């Protein structure tokens, strides 16, 4: 298990370095002068030169990368040109919205998808299965931003139960903060729950046909107990895999949903930085989001080992899958 953990951590470090190189390269091969893009064509040469020096653009590319990557390791993300404040502070302030939103979305998606998938699997080929999977197919097809607009029209405009947009801050109370995040979290969670429910159904159906489940049933175990106690735990690996992939889509969806609901999170900060041509902020946020996806995928690999210890032995010398 220790060797498995060390290999995953080494892979994590290498992927983070590779991601930072790709992000830096992409931002530097884009046409145009970043300083000129920020200041506009009416800026004087002296102002442009000062901004280039401030951003380190007058250094060789390899020095620019080392300066930027070293700053990231120290927690120094540079200074935002638009806000004239450290980018790290901007990001930390916005994480107070984005992280709870992401946690609520994932929690809602799992809470909806697992029961729906199990019920559909236990009623395979029946009306309940067809109805649930039909609803899941509809959920896959509906864009989250369109769903968010429908939620606003229903629960904010027509019923007046929830705020249509904005975020009062956690200082305004936990209830007010959660109320502001509820509709965005539902808009993000439902399409992901639809995908996860379909995967759960397939995995549970496959696991329910295994010998250990049939043996448990033959010994008198009730069908419900056999599914929830034996089939579902062994069907979790594909479910965990999809959860890892969904995190990437969740980050992309957050950028859109935070702008639909005017939430001051990471997604809205990225949108504002792009609109304001604040390239250092864009670069920092993109590498942070990319790194988050890599870290989550590594955690998924570790979750495999926790669910099925045989995963940690795969590929190790002197071991086989039956070990």
Image (cartoon, rainbow, N blue to C red):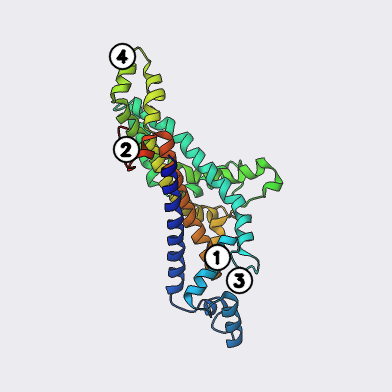
Q: Which mark is residue 319?
A: 2
Mark 4, secondary structure of its residue: helix
Are the residues flagged by discs 4 and 3 in contact, CB closer than 8 Å?
no
Looking at marks 2 and 1 on the same chain, the residue that comes earlier in the sequence is marked by 1
Left/right of residue 10 with respect to residue 317 in the rendered view:
right
**Disc 2 or disc 1, which is closer to the eye?**
2
- Snapshot quadrant of residue 127: top left
Determine the CA span between mark 1 and mark 4.
62 Å
Please tell me how crowded label 2 is: few (under 14), some (14-19), or many (20+) other residues with Cα within 10 Å. Answer: few
4 or 2: tag closer to the N-terminus: 4
**Residue 282 appears at what percent x and percent y?**
52, 65
Residue 145, image x and y in percent?
47, 51
Q: Residue at x 36, y 26 (%)?
A: 231
Residue placed under numbered mark 3 in the picture? 81
Q: CA distance from mark 2 to mark 3?
A: 55 Å
Verify CB contact (< 8 Å) between mark 1 and mark 4.
no
Report which residue position mark 1 lands on.
Answer: 70
| Mark 3, secondary structure of its residue | loop
Counting from the top left corner in percent of width and height, residue 6 is at 44, 47
Which corner quadrant holds the N terminus?
top left
Q: Is residue 47 left or right of residue 7?
A: right
Task: Tell me the SS state at disc 1.
Answer: helix
Q: Which residue is rendered at x = 56% and y = 48% of the image? A: 99
Residue at figure coordinates x 43%, y 77% from the top left: 31
Q: Position of residue 248 (x, y in %)?
A: 44, 51
- Vertical arrangement, residue 14 with respect to residue 195, above or below: below
Instruction: Give the total of numbered labels.
Output: 4
Q: Residues within 10 Å of mark 4 (few under 14, many from 20)?
A: few
The answer to whether one can see residue 45 in this image is yes
């Amino acid at each position: 298990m220790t060797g498995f953990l060390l290999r995953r951590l080494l892979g994590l470090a290498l992927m983070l370095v590779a991601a930072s190189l790709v992000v830096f390269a992409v931002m530097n091969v884009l046409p145009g002068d970043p300083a000129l893009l920020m200041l506009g064509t009416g800026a004087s040469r002296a102002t442009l030169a000062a901004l280039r020096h401030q951003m380190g653009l007058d250094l060789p590319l390899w020095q620019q990368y080392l300066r930027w990557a070293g700053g990231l390791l120290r927690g120094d993300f540079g200074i935002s040109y638009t806000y004239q404040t450290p980018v790290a502070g901007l990001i930390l302030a916005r994480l107070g919205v984005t992280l709870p939103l992401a946690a609520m979305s994932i929690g809602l998606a799992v809470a909806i998808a697992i029961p729906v998938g199990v019920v559909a699997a236990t009623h395979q080929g029946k009306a309940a299965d067809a109805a649930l999977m039909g609803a899941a197919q509809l959920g896959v097809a509906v864009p989250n931003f369109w769903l968010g607009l429908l939620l606003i029209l229903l629960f904010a405009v027509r019923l007046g139960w929830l705020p249509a947009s904005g975020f009062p801050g956690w200082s305004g109370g936990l209830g007010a903060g959660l109320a502001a995040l509820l509709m965005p979290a539902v808009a993000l969670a439902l399409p992901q729950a639809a995908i996860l429910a379909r995967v759960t159904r397939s995995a549970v159906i496959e696991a329910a046909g295994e010998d250990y489940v049939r043996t448990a049933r033959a010994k008198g175990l009730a069908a419900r107990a056999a599914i929830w106690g034996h089939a579902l735990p062994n069907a979790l690996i594909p479910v965990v895999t999809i959860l890892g992939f969904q995190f990437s889509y969740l980050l992309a969806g957050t950028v859109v949903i935070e702008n639909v609901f005017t939430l001051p999170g990471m997604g809205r900060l990225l949108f504002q930085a792009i609109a304001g041509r604040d390239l250092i902020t864009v670069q920092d946020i993109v590498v942070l989001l990319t790194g988050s996806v890599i870290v989550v995928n590594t955690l998924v690999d570790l979750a495999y080992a926790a669910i099925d210890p045989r995963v940690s032995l795969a590929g190790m010398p002197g071991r086989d899958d039956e070990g």
